[in-house]
Image (cartoon, rainbow, N blue to C red):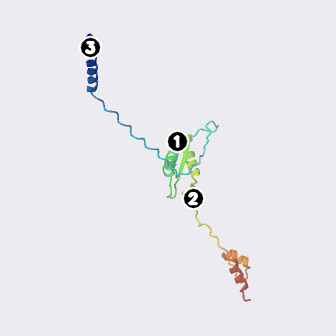
Amino acid sequence: MSSTKSGIGTKYALAAIFAAACAAPRSEPAPAPAPVPAPLVIADLPPVPVQILVTDSTSSRPRDNAARITLTSTNANLRDLLPLLASAAGVNLVMGPAVTGRVSVHFQNVRAIDALNAVIEQAGLVVGSPDADLPWARPVFYDLPVNVNLASAATIRSRFNVTQRLADWLVVGRSF
């Protein structure tokens, strides 16, 4: 009889433990992490050529007091980068509406004016001085007059950009 009482006691003890475990407050499961957006890939930009600008800081020339910069930029817009470099170099900059494009640069302790010139050259742009206006007009070249009544068919064809058949017809059709 004692073994039956101990078996019933064990069953009650297990039932009490199970009931206590079920009655314990439950914690909510952690929310699922937010999905990570896929990286934005811009495939329509062409590969950018890289220009290396080397300066010799150990040369015997006297040290200049020009502003020096360190800059690393990938696929930078020229319309943003050029004014930044011009400001650092202390020069005025005027850009026309045709100035577009992107460049990648990596400058370390370079004079700002050298960095500006390197970016301008790499982008295929031209630097002009405001006082470069000439006091005379640009030359205009004129072709000398050609007497069609005396010119050969080859001369007529090249000078007037006509077909060989028309040039031959003009030569044959002369009435003198």
Residue 31 falls in image quadrant: top left
Residue at 72% x, 81% y: name it.
168
Residue assigned mark 3: 4
Residue in front for this viewpoint, 55 or 166: 166
Disc 1/disc 3 C-alpha distance (Å): 86 Å
**CB-based contact (under 8 Å), mark 2 and mark 1:** no
Residue holding disc 1: 71
Q: What's under tag 1, amino acid-wise?
A: Leu
Alpha carbon of mark 3 to alpha carbon of mark 2: how far? 116 Å
Residue 139, placed above or below residue 67: below
Reading the image, the residue beneath label 2 is 132
Q: Is residue 89 visible?
A: no
Residue 43: x and y in percent read 52, 50
Q: Residue furthest bottom?
A: 175
Image quadrant assignment for residue 125: bottom right
Amino acid type, label 2: Ala
- Left or right of 133 in this view: 148: right
Q: Looking at numbered disc 3 in the image, what kind of residue is underneath it?
A: Thr
Report the mark closest to the observer, 3 or 2.
3
Q: Position of residue 35 (x, y in %)?
A: 41, 41
Structural crowding at the residue carrying mark 3, measured as other residues with C-alpha within 10 Å and reported as few (<14), some (14–19) or many (≥20): few
